[in-house]
């Protein structure tokens, strides 16, 4: 390709045929080509001549444009392009990123979150205002719910309980290169020893219209990777005392957290999970530690944990929630026995005791409880998970509640025309007697509440014995059988008593 013996479009055609070929050798060639192309990324900045770099960028963008990659490889490719665009405009990597992005411009409408990130990149604003205008339209349409994507193109998010505010109407103003370089130089060299001098310099250079641009850089490039400097950056924001800036910093924290929570790569990447925990700690220090609530419309903590449980993403949900809650220890309002806090802790306790968590996730909950001076063993766990139906597409339909109204039962020997006195006696048997229906119901429910801890799946059923869905299905089956048998016995007893009377 580089020697012009074959065109780039011909290479793309070969890759398309190889990716769909049933021949294992063609599949291996396709996989090796992708692997080699990804490995070359680290050499783009310093080792590639301009011509070869542009050809490679065109090929790289075509992989995304023609959907030759998906899932994890697609995430890596898009991340490479995004990282390249964060470089200064004169660098090779930025030129690579612009060419690749322009190649799959028509697919950007499928990724509004990516577009929001691209919208605040200063170098891209200057180099390709036409692309920025396209991206701005996509973001506006997505925020208005009119992105025009088909149902097949839309991807269901695992976490819908974290929702940043809609700030699409806010214009992103990027300072000129000289001004932005000076602002970024200040924040990049900020330290406790020069704090006062750097703050004074920033006060002179910073303007409120740059708040969204600066907030994106601070959260994306600094806060998410530098947990040891969180206190320094908080102090810096306090010294600047710019309300729009604080609002956008909080917004960018929600956006980046939501992106990492929903990203497939976060499940397998320890570095991304560490970044998510850093953002959670930062969010807690911005809000709870300062007695500021996190609005339910932005994060519904219980729903987030339940979504993590249902989608098998507790590996990201529990550390994220725990790191936020830990900052309640520095709060006057959001510390025990705050009802909101204890409600979330109670759900964490249920997950701890009944969800068969990995040891590292149990440890996260233990650390949070210790930080808040809560004795985990004394926390009354919720029954939210244990009372929920099994989310299993192969589960049989739920059995109807047993009919307690004897008149509606199809029993030909039952005489609905009994005397009033007989009906009153039967009613007393069902409600007033110590062994009546209400008492039996209470006793049954008391027994059923402990079923999850009593049902043990035999290890000889491996690997099913370790499957949480299978175990929950067994628990639900035992519970239903017990409930039906108990109510059936009571109703049969009531039925026979009608003859005695």
Image (spheres, helix red, strand yellow):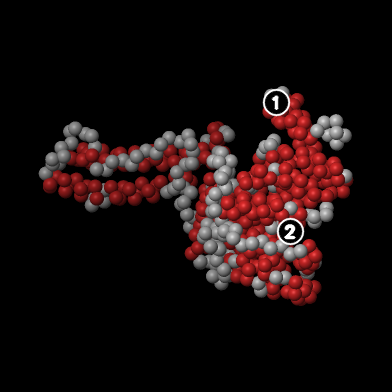
List x then y, in percent, for residue 158: 57, 47
Q: Is residue 432 above or below residue 197?
A: above
Q: Earlier in the sequence, mark 2 or mark 1?
A: 1
Q: Residue furthest front?
A: 130
Location of residue 274 in the rendering, given as x and y in whole percent from the top left corner = 69, 54
Left or right: 244 with respect to 53? left
Above or below: residue 238 compared with residue 90: below
Mark 1 burial class by Cα count in 10 Å: few <14, some 14-19, many 20+? few
484 to the left or right of 238: left
Secondary structure at badge 2 equals helix
Residue 363 visible in image: no
Residue 191: percent from the left, percent from the top?
A: 78, 69
Q: Residue at x 76, y 54 (%)?
A: 127
Q: Secondary structure at mark 1?
A: loop
Q: Nearer the viewer, residue 321 or 449?
A: 321
Say if mark 2 contacts mark 1, CB within 8 Å: no
Return the mark for residue 296.
none
Q: Residue at x 69, y 74 (%)?
A: 239
| Residue at the spot of label 2 | 122
| Of 35 and 181, the residue lying toward us | 181
Q: Which residue is mark 1?
A: 21
* Of 135 and 330, the residue lying toward us: 135
Residue 107 sits in quarter:
top right
Residue 370, by quadrant, is: bottom right
Q: Say which of marks 2 and 1 sits in front.
A: 2
Which residue does the image show at 78% across and 66% down from the upper left?
A: 179
Q: Residue visible at 70% across and 52% down? A: 130
Q: Is residue 490 left or right of residue 45?
A: left
Mark 2 neighbour class, 10 Å CA radius: few under 14, some 14 to 19, many 20 or more: many
- Asked whether the viewer can see residue 432, the reply is yes
């Amino acid at each position: 390709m580089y020697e012009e013996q074959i065109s780039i479009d011909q290479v793309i055609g070969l890759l398309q045929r190889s990716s769909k070929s049933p021949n294992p050798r063609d599949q291996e060639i396709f996989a090796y080509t992708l692997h080699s192309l990804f490995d070359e990324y680290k050499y783009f900045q310093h080792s590639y001549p301009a011509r070869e770099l542009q050809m490679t960028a065109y090929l790289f963008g075509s992989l995304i444009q023609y959907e030759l990659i998906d899932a994890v490889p697609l995430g890596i490719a898009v991340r490479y392009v995004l990282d390249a665009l964060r470089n200064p405009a004169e660098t090779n990597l930025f030129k690579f990123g612009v060419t690749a992005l322009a190649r799959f411009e028509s697919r950007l409408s499928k990724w509004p979150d990516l577009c929001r990130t691209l919208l605040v990149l200063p170098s891209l604003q200057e180099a390709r205002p036409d692309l920025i205008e396209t991206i701005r339209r996509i973001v506006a349409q997505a925020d208005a719910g009119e992105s025009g994507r088909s149902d097949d193109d839309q991807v269901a998010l695992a976490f819908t309980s974290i929702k940043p505010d809609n700030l699409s109407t806010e214009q992103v103003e990027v300072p000129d290169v000289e001004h932005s370089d000076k602002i970024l130089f200040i924040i990049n060299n900020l330290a406790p020893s020069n704090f006062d001098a750097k703050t004074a310099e920033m006060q002179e250079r910073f303007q409120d219209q740059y708040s969204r641009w600066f907030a994106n850089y601070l959260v994306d490039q600094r806060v998410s990777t530098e947990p040891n400097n969180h206190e320094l950056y908080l102090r810096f924001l306090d010294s600047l005392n710019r309300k729009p800036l604080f609002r956008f910093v909080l917004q960018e924290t929600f956006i980046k957290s939501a992106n990492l929570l929903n990203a497939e790569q976060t499940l397998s990447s320890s570095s991304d999970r560490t970044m998510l925990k850093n953002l959670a700690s930062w969010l807690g220090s911005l809000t709870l530690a300062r007695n500021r609530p996190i609005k339910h419309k932005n994060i519904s903590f219980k729903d987030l944990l339940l979504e993590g449980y249902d989608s098998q993403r507790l590996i990201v949900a529990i550390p994220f929630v725990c790191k936020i809650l830990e900052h309640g220890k520095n709060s006057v309002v959001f510390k025990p026995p705050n009802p909101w806090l204890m409600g979330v802790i109670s759900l964490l306790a249920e997950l701890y005791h009944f969800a068969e968590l990995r040891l590292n996730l149990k440890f996260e909950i233990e650390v949070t409880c210790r930080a808040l001076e809560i004795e985990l063993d004394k926390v009354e766990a919720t029954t939210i998970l244990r009372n929920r139906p099994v989310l299993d597409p192969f589960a049989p339909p739920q059995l109807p509640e047993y009919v307690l109204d004897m008149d509606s039962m199809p029993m030909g020997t039952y005489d609905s025309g009994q005397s009033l006195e007989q009906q009153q006696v039967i009613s007393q048997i069902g409600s007033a007697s110590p062994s009546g229906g209400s008492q039996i119901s209470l006793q049954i429910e008391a027994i059923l509440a402990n079923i999850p801890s009593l049902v043990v799946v035999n290890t000889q059923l491996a690997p099913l014995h370790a499957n949480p869905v299978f175990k929950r299905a067994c628990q639900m089956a035992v519970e239903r059988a017990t409930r039906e048998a108990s109510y059936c016995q009571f109703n049969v007893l009531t039925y026979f008593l009608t003859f005695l009377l």
